[in-house]
Each structure stands twice: as structure tokens, then as C-alpha cells.
Amino acid sequence: MTTHWWTGPSERKPRIIARRGGAALATENSIEALHAAARAGADAIETDVRLTRDGALVCFHDVDLRRLCGDPRAVADLDPATLRRLFPALMMLGEALAASGSLGVVLDIKLTDEPQIPRVIDEIVRANAVERTMLGLRGIDLIVAARAARPDIAILAFLEEPDSATGAQEAGANWFRLWQGAATAEGAAVIRETGMRLAVMVGQPRSMPLPEYLPFPVGAIDRDGLERLHSIAPDAILLDDPRLAAACFE
């Protein structure tokens, strides 16, 4: 039986995950970014999954096109052809799974309806990518739905507080995400006591401008910040520029 990339033996150093495909290297969530992340030393890429008006699964972070295209319309209100006209680098989920090659993949699922989760898993199965793909889910109900749909899929809990770790593990999560500001020895211990692995998202959540965070937006960090993460030995680090972590954790 094939060893799962995310739940097999632990690595000696953190796995470096290029957020939004490697947003510091090329247009975010694009095939160009995925290829650049691989060249830059990333172990895995992270991309986002949303539904279009006609039910297609696309890799797009924001709920609408305002930031990237100056268009206020929501992704869910447009079809893929219109989205690609406005944002030519748009990837369909299947394209992202193919373009990621042998890299690990984290899918930040922006869907909130439980019945949609099996559709995402079916796409992963069709791409023969189950062994290297992990679902990032933002609710206990979604974790339960994913685990019921596919017992061997890896799941990363994108929950806000370490106190949610036990519930996430009991629901079926294998990994838990902490924001950099919460990635303390105490917070890491809470996650590890459940048996889950720890992923750290660097930078500051846009909706939570807290003083304990370094003055970097989500996805950004400096070498000092990366070196401070050494003390808690995370199993993975998500950041926009994988070159920083590749140099720090050689």
C-alpha cells in the first residue's frame, strides 16, 4: 500500500508549503506559481477551491474579483470562461492537481456545504492524487463529512483556536493549523497531545490585527521569524515565498 505523503513518517525538517501556489513568485494560484514554487524548493503547494456559478471547481482565494481584477462580482456568480477572461491565470482544480506534479498539495476548501466535499474528493481521485493531497477544512461538520467520504484522505483543520484541537482530531483531522502568533510552545503542545501534526501559517490574519503578531501580512515572514519557529519544530510552514524557509531549514 502506498504511503500517504501527509500521514506517513515524519520528516526531519518542516515541510515547506508555498501558499497560494507561491504568491511571492508569480501570479497567485497559477500554474506559473506552482512551477516556480517547485524550482524554489517547496515541498508542497497550497491553493484555494471555490465553486463557480455552474458548479465548476476553481482555484481562487477571494470571494470576489475586486482585489485581483477590480471587478466586484463574486466567483460564485460567474462561469469559468468569464473568470478566465477577467483572470487569465485561473486554474481549474484538475489543472492544479496535474500541474503540481509530485509535490504535496493542500487545498484550502472555501466551500461550506457538506455535500460539496465529496465532489472535491472525487476530483482528487480522478487525478490519482489522494496520496499527496490534504484537505484544509474550516468546520467540524466539514471534517466529519470528508472523513466519511474518504477514510484515507488527509485533513488539515483550519480552525481558529488551539482549544478546538481535540474536537478536530475526534472528527477525523490529521493536522491542525496555528497562526504564527499562536505558535507558542504551549499552543504546539496542545496540538501534539491530540496526536495531530502541526502546520504554522506565517504572518497576521487580516481580521485579527493583534499586537503579538509581527508586522507582516498573512503569508509573509522574515528570517528572524522563521528561526523563532525552530523552537516549536512545526511539521509544516505555509508562506508565500518558499525560498525563505528553504534557506532557513536546510
Image (cartoon, rainbow, N blue to C red):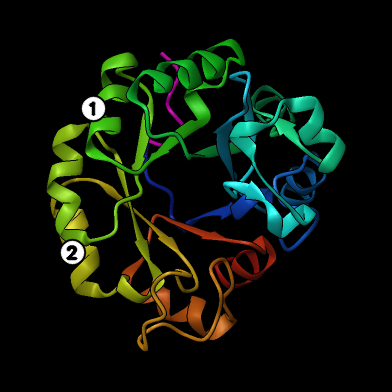
In the rendered image, residue 182, in percent from the top left (x then y), is placed at 30, 72
Q: Look at the image and give the residue range highlighted in magenta.
A: 1-7
Above or below for 128 versus 186:
above
Three-letter amino acid code at disc 1? Val
Q: Is residue 37 above or below residue 161?
A: above
Q: Is residue 136 left or right of residue 160?
A: right
Reading the image, the residue beneath label 1 is: 144
| Of the two numbered discs 1 and 2 in the rendering, the one whose residue sits closer to the viewer | 1
User: For residue 22, which quarter of the picture?
Assistant: bottom right
Tell which of 25 and 14 is nearer to you.
Answer: 25
Q: Is residue 42 visible?
A: yes
In-image side of 33 versus 74 (left or right): right
Q: Nearer the viewer, residue 82 or 95?
A: 82
Q: Say which residue label 2 marks.
A: 189
| Rendered position, 204 above or below 236 | below
Q: Position of residue 31 (x, y in %)?
A: 78, 39
Q: Determine if residue 40 is in view.
A: no
Residue nearest the observer in this picture, 205 or 182: 205
Label 2: how many Cα within 10 Å (few below 14, some 14–19, many 20+): some
Residue 209 is situated, as x and y percent measured from the top left of the image, at 41, 80
Q: Are marks 1 and 2 in contact (CB under 8 Å)?
A: no
Q: Amino acid at mark 2?
A: Ala
**Label 2 secondary element:** helix
3D distance between C-alphas at marks 1 and 2: 24 Å
Q: Earlier in the sequence, mark 1 or mark 2?
A: 1
Is 4 a magenta residue?
Answer: yes
Which quadrant does the C terminus fall into?
A: bottom right
* Residue occupying the point 29% across, 38% down: 174
Helix, strand or loop at mark 1: helix
Rendered residue at 59%/72% (across/down) = 220
